[in-house]
Amino acid sequence: MMKKLLAASALTAFGAVFMAGPAAAADSCELSISGNDQMQFNKSELVVPADCDEVTLTLEHTGKMPVAQMGHNWVLSKEADKQAITSEGMQAGLDNEYLPDDDKIIAHTDLIGGGESSSVTFSTADLEAGGDYSYYCTFPGHSSMMHGKLIVK
């Protein structure tokens, strides 16, 4: 009886792991982050498994302030390009969501206000494991506090 019980438990555990395989991989390719009215992201690091073909990131603005006063976006680039993108973004202005027309931007969400959310799905084909990638908010003055690392491994 004990052997049958152990065998049944092992099969159940195997089935659970086997069934979770593709779903778990898909879940790890979906990321979320939030920003608040205190100019803070809730995460300073996001990890993407190297086997993800694409990633979907969802940004949620947990504050209450409107987009014109405390808008947030999530912008991904190489760390070396961050300063130029944020500077050019200020010049682009609110009408352009503080985003320059720059192909160094790997991905970005819309600029959102309190209570809103925005998602972006992007390919990981050009991202390298161990690469130096940063994410940040391009609303003027926010990138100094609202930034983090995207790690591909």
Image (cartoon, rainbow, N blue to C red):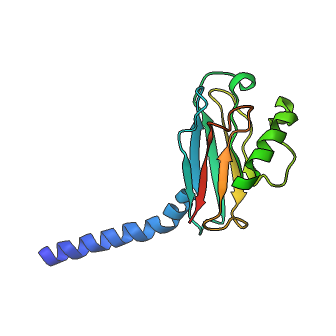
Residue 99 shows in this picture = no
Which one is nearer the viewer's eye here, 37 or 32?
Answer: 37
Q: Which quadrant, please, contains the C terminus?
A: bottom right
The correct choice, above or below, for 13 with respect to 66 in the image is below
Residue 72 shows in this picture = yes
Question: Is residue 24 shown left or right of residue 85?
Answer: left
Which one is nearer the viewer's eye here, 131 or 6?
Answer: 131
The residue at the point 69 percent across, 39 percent down is 137
Residue 80 at what x, y percent from top left? 73, 54
Q: Which quadrant, please, contains the N terminus?
A: bottom left
Question: Is residue 80 shown left or right of residue 14?
Answer: right
The residue at the point 75 percent across, 24 percent down is 68
The residue at the point 68 percent across, 26 percent down is 70
Residue 89 at what x, y percent from top left? 81, 39
Residue 46 at what x, y percent from top left? 56, 52
The residue at the point 65 percent across, 21 percent down is 65
The correct choice, above or below, for 58 with respect to 129 in the image is above
- Res. 110 image quadrant: top right
Outermost residue on the left side: it is 1
Count of numbered marks: 0
Residue 135 at what x, y percent from top left? 66, 48
The correct choice, above or below, for 141 with respect to 46 in the image is above
